[in-house]
Amino acid sequence: MPDLSKQPLRFSREAADFYQTLRKRANQYFEENNISKHANSQMVLKTITMILLYVVPFLALLFFVNNSLIFILMWFLMGLGAAGIGLCVMHDANHGAYSSNKYVNLILGNITYILGACASHWKLQHNVLHHTYTNVDGYDHDLSAPILRFSPHTKKLKIHRFQHYYAWVMYSLMTISWSTIKEFKQVGGFKKMGLIKSSKKYWNLFLESVFGKIFYFGVFLVLPALITPFSFWFVLLGFVIMHIVTGLLLSLVFQPAHVILNTEFPLPDEKGNLENNWAIHQILTTANFAGGSKFFTWVLGGLNYQIEHHLFPSICHVHYPKLSEIVEQTAKEFNLPYYSEKTWWSAIANHGKMLRQLAHAA
């Protein structure tokens, strides 16, 4: 695992005029239309909807449901709600994009606790590593998975030859990993990479996970087992179904944005230098899908516009459709690609082809 404190990666300073031009045009759009870069009324309504989709089924299964099929249905709906909160609410908040008020972002960002994750860990993996070193093997932790090969630069194992078959099952277990062991494994990795520079910070993150898990499992697993008429094993089944739904949905949004046939997987040279500047790096390693769909833009938290999100992570996702027109035109002027699949399904299919290619390539 690379130590960023000893050998930080450096982006090129060449061709900086692309991002300068892009930012100028984006800022001009907001100024001319007198629009805030943060959440609007549509976003607030979506926030309430997604939280209710998670909380109402939980309260229902706790106090009102006696039928086993309806009990499982409530867990299924909670899975949709958890994915909705992750995609549409906490993601913007933890990027500081939801509001200009840092306390609003803090409160909505920490909603991750009711999803089984801790915001501090998420910010280090997602905001710092993934958004900075997108698709750089060894640095972008989104490329790291126990038995999956997401980069041509990752060492190939024998089991990888079947990954295009079993990857979808692994995706469904993603949030189970989040809520159990992943953060405890990560915190040591963050320290080795130099992201955590003191023992105090290390133990703060470690204990945040410990108490976060105690709260999460106490409320969302132990409590239903104690007060509902169903056995612990049936409650556990519902709990796992919820996570399968959430994990699969989240994976099928994020993986087709980076691990597809079109995108690049840059490597630094021996001195830690990357070929392109940060903005061009994001263009080359990221792809959109279903850009014309208002429905998917709404339910997926604008993360079908991943290019815009990576270039403007501090801007709320409700503005991505308009920004996409500016980004695509500017990329074209600078002879840069703008990867985009017409549908979500075609993006998933592209990702599946990439998994197969990585399964067989050396």
Image (cartoon, helix red, strand yellow):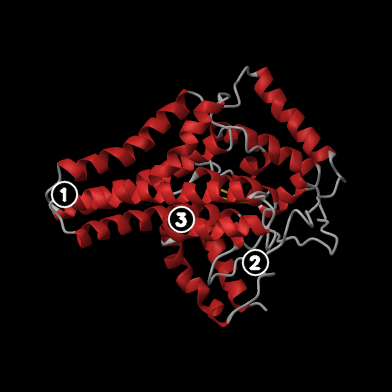
**Circle 2: element type:** loop
Identify the amino acid type marked 3. Trp
Above or below residue 40? Residue 108 is: below
Label 2 amino acid? Ser
Per the rendering, the mark at residue 151 is 2
- Under circle 1, the secondary element is loop
Residue under label 1: 228
Secondary structure category for the residue under label 3: helix
- Judging depth in this view, the residue of 296 and 220 nearest the camera is 220
From mark 3 to mark 2, how far is it between C-alphas? 21 Å
Picture disc at residue 178: 3
Task: Identify the residue at horizontal 32%, vertical 46% (top origin).
Answer: 78
Q: Is residue 56 above or below residue 162?
A: above
Residue 259 visible in the picture: no
**Residue 273, picture quadrant:** bottom right
Q: Residues within 10 Å of mark 2 (few under 14, many from 20)?
A: many
Which of labels 2 and 1 is toward the front?
1
Residue 302 in sight from this viewpoint: yes
Counting residues from the start of the chain, the first of labels 3 and 2 encountered is: 2
